[in-house]
Amino acid sequence: MDRLREEAAITVEVDGRRDLAGLPVARVRPTDPGSLPRLRARLEDAGIPTFEADLRHAYRFLVERGLRAGVEIEGRSVVSPDDPDLLVFRNPRLSPADVRFESRTLSLDIETTPDASEVFAISLVGCGVEEVHLLSPVPVEGAVVHADERELLRALVLAVRRLDPDVILGWNVVDFDLRVLARRAARLRVALDLGREPGAPRFEQDSGYTRSSRVEIPGRMVLDGIGLVRDAMRLPDYRLDTVARAVLGRGKRIDADVPDASAEIQRLRREDPRALVAYNLEDARLVGEILAAEGLLDLAVERSRLSGMQLDRVGASIASFDLLYLPELHRRGVVAPNVRADRTDAVVQGGAVLEPRPGLFRDVAVYDFKSLYPSLIRTFQLDPLAHARAAASPGTDAIEAPNGARFAREGGILPGIVEHFLASRDAARSRGDRHADQAIKIMMNAMFGVLGAAACRFFDPEIANAITGFGQQTLSWTREAIEGCGYDVLYGDTDSVFVRLRGGEPGVGATAEAEALRVRVEQAIVERIRSGFGVEPRLVLELEHVLARFFLPRVRGGAGGSKKRYAGWVDGRLLVVGLESVRRDWPAVARRLQEGMLERIFTDRDPAPFVGEVVARVRAGELDDELVYAKRVRKGSLDGYASAPPHVQAARKAGGTRGGVVRWVVTRSGPEPVLPGRPLPERIDREHYVTRVLEPVADAIFAESGGSFGEAIGRPKQLALL
Ligand code: DCP
Ligand code: MG
Ligand code: MG
């Protein structure tokens, strides 16, 4: 260390900072940041541990100034020589600011030859325009035409700079449109200066497990509609056509999945350029409209404001943990460890599951803790610094988790961060913003998740298991409190419980009874935590539903109930969780049967005639469209072993998949792929569907309601015994 002090290019300060264990550290800083990795290696070779030596410069800059998504710039500026609308600050002072702004967005879509070797149309929608640039020797109505591809690309650059969007949008825009444009521009020697200052797009792939790609264009953000939708909504697939239909009720003009879509586009180019222009424009329009309809851009902005991450990395939870946590840690004079390469993700215990009691029930209350893990973090100070502080002073009074991990009673950081998120989630809920509600919930739970991720510098399975341990304790205390009030718990999972209401008290409806029980149970838990741990509990138990009817299936071939699968009847509507009918890979006919049966049973009607009717219609070929299975094919499974599961067989016969999902039906010669825009395969094996799909689905319900599939379809009894 003393030798380092003598080197001119390095400063060494000892300013009272400590590591998590409380030992003093020195701050060693090279004048040239590029030499940091070498310096780190030198120190480590000399047996001196380093801290935060792996934090990227840009993030260290942000962390040291507590900068988040919004900043205030202070300093002298000059007008940019490249653009009179731009101010240039040299080395200004940046400070955090709470910024809200309306972003200018531009949606971009290109059309190319099938091998993407030539770009011939580019549409731009947003910033007050809808325009299409087209490669064409003759004028085309509705388009700006260009004589060669080089001119087309130049026109794009000029248009983007003129429209000056903050955000560029598209569908697969990073990996397709912009990559193709960058490749063509390089080939044709056009400077693809799409940014607010010169510089070609720079592509990056996150090293994290998402491997999502992003692109840097100076002064703008590029957001891919697919990623934004995928984070917020569950859909069978994320093709533009599917998403547009689900969100806007209208699809693409030509579904790109139709086998001849590409040929059709090439035909339009030759024969009907006006239609091509309309098609190209519509794609760009759909992207903007989808995001606007679902408020997904606003959501990305909200997530960025919360996590501090830039708009196009709001899902990066490990980096975001650093950005939230490190400034607070530094304020307390503490530095964090490096990420260690020598460890693997921890096995963290999950939530508890209470043994289900299968059957059909009336009046069941469903309770669930609001933001359970974040609430536990707040209540019990479950936090890396609090954990380290307790370890550093073993004698003192600490909070002890069920797994034995100890936490100092004060000075935790995570509880404060979580509190901020909880407030933002409450605000989202009260303005009825379901996407933000869900996204903030996921972001909070990701903060728990990264504690078990090896790539996180705060990796600590003890803390993660303290959180889940408290979660398990909460669930079992909840059950005890409910039983203590004289009620039966039918099922419970992680932080939710299903309770059979007793009814019978005159003038008290099921909802009022459920609410009264909720208050008593919540109170019992609060008191138990207060007296057991001496902390102020932050847990809120919510009454999620009062189900007029409840169905909990038996495990197949067993006596116990099955987990995370049930159905209920609430406010005249069917609620289904985890059953076949909500699974994407099951044919739609399973859903028709299951939901139809449950609806009848829940409204006191006999389901048997309905079952007979569905089977008859399947046999008559009237429901063939509902017999299609769909399943994701994992990469690499197409080449490999010869005897393959049905979806792999079907994908092989189809010569691959589109978007990774294969759709097929079972025919008398095995699984056959179903291709978009083509008729269903012939010789569908309808008896397969009767015995392998409908029968098990029906019998799972009949097992509780009485009756059987065989009886419902009039199958002779002896045959069933054979
Ligand atoms: N959990 C998780 N990851 C998930 C779902 C849940 O880590 N994908 C953990 C954290 C949650 C707990 O399980 O706190 C309970 O799950 P909930 O779905 O009930 O989520 P919350 O309690 O956090 O939120 P809500 O207020 O919606 O119940
Ligand atoms: Mg919950
Ligand atoms: Mg729950």
Image: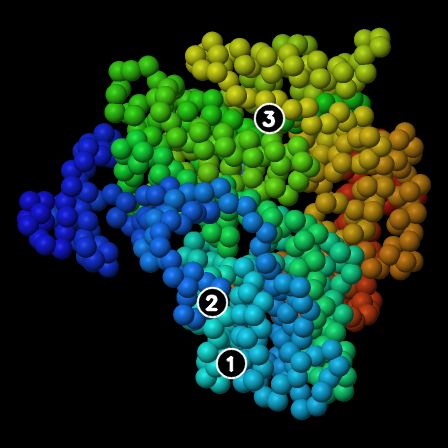
Quick one: SS at disc 1? helix
**Residue position for label 3:** 369
Callout 3–callout 1 Cβ contact below 8 Å? no
> Nearest the camera: 377 or 306?
306
- Write the residue at 78% across / 57% down: 249
Report the quarter where the N terminus lies: top left
Name which quarter of the figure residue 655 lies in: bottom right
> Nearest the camera: 234 or 168?
168
**Residue position for label 1:** 184
> Nearest the camera: 618 or 196?
196
Report the quarter where the C terminus lies: top right
Q: Amino acid at mark 3?
A: Phe
Q: Position of residue 305 (x, y in %)?
A: 50, 44
Q: Amino acid at mark 1?
A: Arg
Q: Is residue 384 above or below residue 483?
A: below
Quick one: SS at disc 2? loop
Query: What is the C-alpha distance between the residues marked 3 and 1?
Result: 54 Å
Q: Earlier in the sequence, mark 3 or mark 2?
A: 2
Name which quarter of the figure residue 22 lies in: top left
Say few, some or many: other residues with alpha carbon within 10 Å of mark 2 (under 14 / 14 to 19 / 20 or more). few
Q: Farthest residue toward the bottom?
A: 137
Q: Earlier in the sequence, mark 2 or mark 1?
A: 2
Q: Position of residue 14 (x, y in %)?
A: 16, 38
- Mark 2, mark 1: which one is toward the viewer? 2
**Is residue 352 something that shows in the picture?**
no
Quick one: SS at disc 3? strand
Q: Amino acid at mark 2?
A: Pro
**Residue position for label 2:** 84
For ligand 2, tell me if the residue under mark 3 lies within 8 Å.
yes
